[in-house]
Amino acid sequence: MDVVIGKNPVIEALNSSLQINRVSFSKDINRKEIQEIIKLCEEKKVPYNWVDREKLDEHGKAHQGVMALISSVDYASLYSLIHKEGLIILLDGITDPHNLGAIIRSAHSFGAQGLVIAKRRSASLDAISFKASAGAAAHLPVARVSNLKDAIDSFKSKGYWVYGADGGARTEIGQIDFPKKTLLVMGSEDKGISRLVEEACDELFRIPMGEFESLNVSVASGIACYNYYLQHR
């Protein structure tokens, strides 16, 4: 079982296809603040109860008095993503769940069709990433794969062009005309994209900056997604 904490993330979870087993409210919460959640629970026949705030604190202090207990997240299949017709994000070495959640939020906001992460050495969908996504994780398909290079090859076989973010690249992101079927590869701030994944990219790009050497990966991902969005809105 996994948990989702926070008012908006719980509302998004209730409005998604996730299986919600129970919603718990802090006994000291102002009930006027949670009328929408209670109504959703009753409409969808999701049981709810009242617990001591300390019980919710066990799952993080940012719960806002609300927590949903959900069945383990069902990841999307790679097969389902490679047959889509739009923007897909592939993350290489993103281990911070806050960054993962923020990337999911930006990707969903700018119309991405899905996201790919590795099964090892990567953050996964959990309470932290779900909260950081502001509930977008309930709506954006995320696939987990054993080998990122093989996943890239699968996308290429379906006509995708692969673009990797690299601070040392000659081409600026504004110079790229992204095709409809684009796979954007984002690496971590400290290590960037791994060698094998970089070699699999069709083209590398950089995001021009001022005095700073690098952007937070979630910010960089948002900029990249926005550039794609501007060309295909």
Image: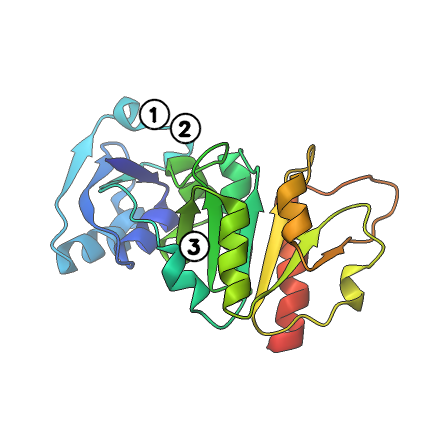
* In the image, residue 143 above or below residue 100: below
The location of residue 23, given as percent across then percent down, is 21, 42
Q: Amino acid at mark 2?
A: Lys
Q: How many marks?
A: 3
* In the image, residue 156 above or below residue 180: above
The circle drawn on residue 136 is 3
Q: Are marks 1 and 3 in contact (CB under 8 Å)?
A: no
Q: Quadrant of the N terminus?
A: top left
User: Which mark is first along the chain, 3 or 2?
Assistant: 2
At 29% from the left and 58% from the top, the residue drawn is 16
Identify the secondary structure beneath mark 3.
helix
Quote the CA–CA distance across marks 2 and 3: 20 Å
Quote the CA–CA distance across marks 2 and 1: 5 Å
* In the image, residue 110 above or below residue 50: below
**Other residues around mark 2 within 10 Å, as few (<14) / some (14–19) / many (≥20):** few
The location of residue 69, given as percent across then percent down, is 23, 39
Q: Quadrant of residue 188?
A: top right
At 43% from the left and 54% from the top, the residue drawn is 136
**Other residues around mark 1 within 10 Å, as few (<14) / some (14–19) / many (≥20):** some
Q: Amino acid at mark 1?
A: Asp
In this rendering, the label closer to the viewer, 1 or 3: 3
228 on left or right of 99: right
The circle drawn on residue 61 is 2
Q: Is residue 170 visible?
A: yes
**Other residues around mark 3 within 10 Å, as few (<14) / some (14–19) / many (≥20):** many
Identify the secondary structure beneath mark 2.
helix
Q: Are marks 2 and 1 in contact (CB under 8 Å)?
A: yes
At 82% from the left and 46% from the top, the residue drawn is 168
Q: Amino acid at mark 3?
A: Ala
